[in-house]
Amino acid sequence: MIGQVGQMKKRVGGAVAGLGWKSGLAVLLLAWSGFAAAVDPRVAQDSRQAFKSFAQPLVGSWDCSLRSWDDRFRERMVETPQKRRFEWVLRGNFLQETVHAVLRGGDTVHVGINLLSVDPETMHILGSGFDAVTPDRRMLLDAELAPDLRHLSGKVQMRPGKEGAEADQRFDWQWTDTDRTRSRLYSRDSNGREFLNHELICKRAADAAAGSGE
């Protein structure tokens, strides 16, 4: 399969080289549709169903606490209360997460947005997110969904990196109770040693129940 894709890419590349950019784009779109059709429909259906089963319990509002450490010694911790909300968007194909920081007076400010979807071939959960503080950077998530649909493990990338290529961060997310989740993000120090960089603890808001709409 990999060899076939490689040969197809070469043929597409040669065709594009002799065309204008509009015609070349059309060829690329046609080639991409061919790649998409190569995914087994049964596998794609299973992936979408697994994603729905994983994501549906998250729909609704959550009260969260984000804890951050600068290094592996964990001498200084910054804790930020947050409110997060999950809802289905784009015909129910994506799960949108909006993030609001809670200020001291109780007011909230919108600080981030994430979109989650599923890779139909690998059943990996994919994510793309933006932060209000760094609008020129984006977060990319690629995580494997456990068979019980209660645990994610993978990596997070920030692009572009602050100074060239930035190291990937290890990501771990899981349900800890019926209405509680915990996610952790691990970084590496200058010596390559891993440490807990961020921990997010969330509890379903008392006035929010899991939704069923798309």
Image (spheres, helix red, strand yellow):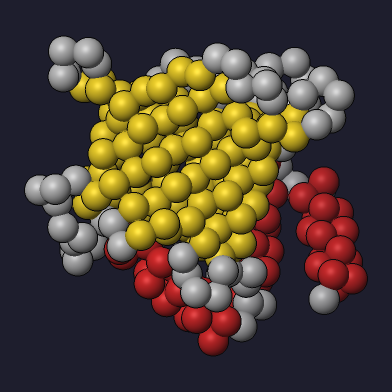
162 above or below 178?
A: above
Q: Is residue 4 above or below residue 119?
A: below
Q: Position of residue 176 (x, y in %)?
A: 41, 57
For the point 60% across and 29% down, the residue is 197
In front of the other: 24 or 200: 200
In the displayed structure image, the side of residue 177 where residue 138 appears, left or right: right
Q: Is residue 28 above or below residue 158?
A: below
> From the image, which quarter does the C terminus lie in?
bottom left
Can residue 84 be seen?
A: yes
**Spot occupied by residue 155 in the image (x, y as percentages of width and height):** 65, 46
Quadrant location of residue 198? top right
Q: Quadrant of residue 65?
A: top left
Q: Is residue 185 left or right of residue 54?
A: right
x, y percentage for residue 7?
Answer: 88, 66
**Seen from this angle, which residue lies furthest bottom?**
42
Say whether residue 41 is visible: no
Q: Is 161 in front, or is 193? A: 193
Q: Image point 89% across, 71% down: which residue? A: 3
The quadrant in which the N terminus is found is bottom right
Q: Residue at x 82, y 53 (%)?
A: 13
> 19 or 169: which is nearer to us?
169
